[in-house]
Image (spheres, grey):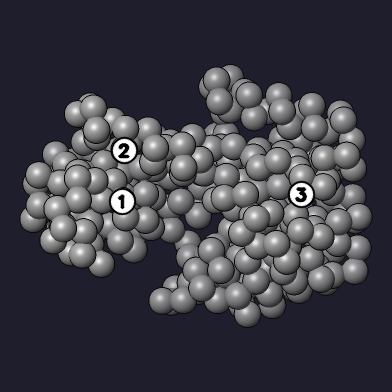
Amino acid sequence: NIKQFTDKKYDVIVTVGFLMADATVQAAKDYPDTKFIGVDQFQAETVANLTGLIFPEDQAGYAAGYLAGLLTKTNKLGQVLGLEIAPVQKFAMGFEAGALAANPNVTVTTVYHPMADNGFNDPEWGAAEAEKQLAQGADVIFGAGGNTGNGALRTIAAAEGAGTSIYCIGVDADQWGTVPEAQPCLVTSAMKLITEGTKELVLAAKDGTIPAGNFDGKTGLAPYHDFDAKLDAGIKDQVATIVAGLADGSVQTGVTLG
């Protein structure tokens, strides 16, 4: 797929996902006159014409967890996740840290998909795990694992009480649009601002100022959409303060890996 674009001598090629990382590094070395942007691809070595667009997933998770900690009535939260790799771990650890900061009485049940090729594309497993957490009393569940997490979101949306006493939170993009079946429970999504970061890097490539190595993108929470009028104004204000604090550095997640 990359070769389709290198053969046509495109100026900038964007590849998406950590599974594309090795192929992107090799292509960048093979085509040094082409600029490459690897979304969600941490660069362990610096290649002059390759930029890894990475994100502080712990911050997005923290904001989502803080909201969940304020929303829960059972003090039981859940996470249905993809593979146990660094970006997903950061989402999960941030979510738990944010939830506990908002509500020290919560407990968070966290499950990662077993290591397999379908770790991010197993909606049946995600749905089954969400059902288990609902049965255990979780009333806010974070689905962070591609189509695996989407399976969890759909199951929660179909549950009795969805959107009134049970909520779900999406990941990466605003899943109100990408998984409309989840709308009955989808209070927000923990977003990586991929569009903004990619645009900034493409423009930098055009200007000749694109950095090699890693580039830190931004994160945030998606709009509340239909839930905006239903959420308590005090909760929304508290979450907005946390989001602003994460952005300016006055709020720290405390998450470290490695």
Q: On screen, 206 above or below 22?
A: above
Q: Earlier in the sequence, mark 3 or mark 1?
A: 1
**In the displayed structure, would residue 105 be above or below residue 162?**
above
Relative depth, front residue between 77 and 33? 33
| Residue at x 62% of width, y 23% of height | 245
Q: Amino acid at mark 3?
A: Val
How many numbered marks are there?
3
- The residue to which callout 1 is attached is 14
Q: Nearer the viewer, mark 3 or mark 1?
A: 1
Q: Residues within 10 Å of mark 2 (few under 14, many from 20)?
A: many
Spot occupied by residue 157 in the image (x, y as percentages of width and height): 79, 65
Look at the picture and state if 198 lies above or below 38: above
> Image point 46% across, 51% down: which residue?
87
Task: Give the distance between the C-alpha atoms of the residues marked 3 and 1, in whole angstroms.
Answer: 31 Å
- Mark number for residue 202? 2
Whether residue 136 is visible: no
Locate residue 48: give its quadrant: top left
What residue appears at the point 59 percent right and 37 percent down from the top-left corner?
Answer: 220
**From the image, which quarter does the N terminus lie in?**
bottom left
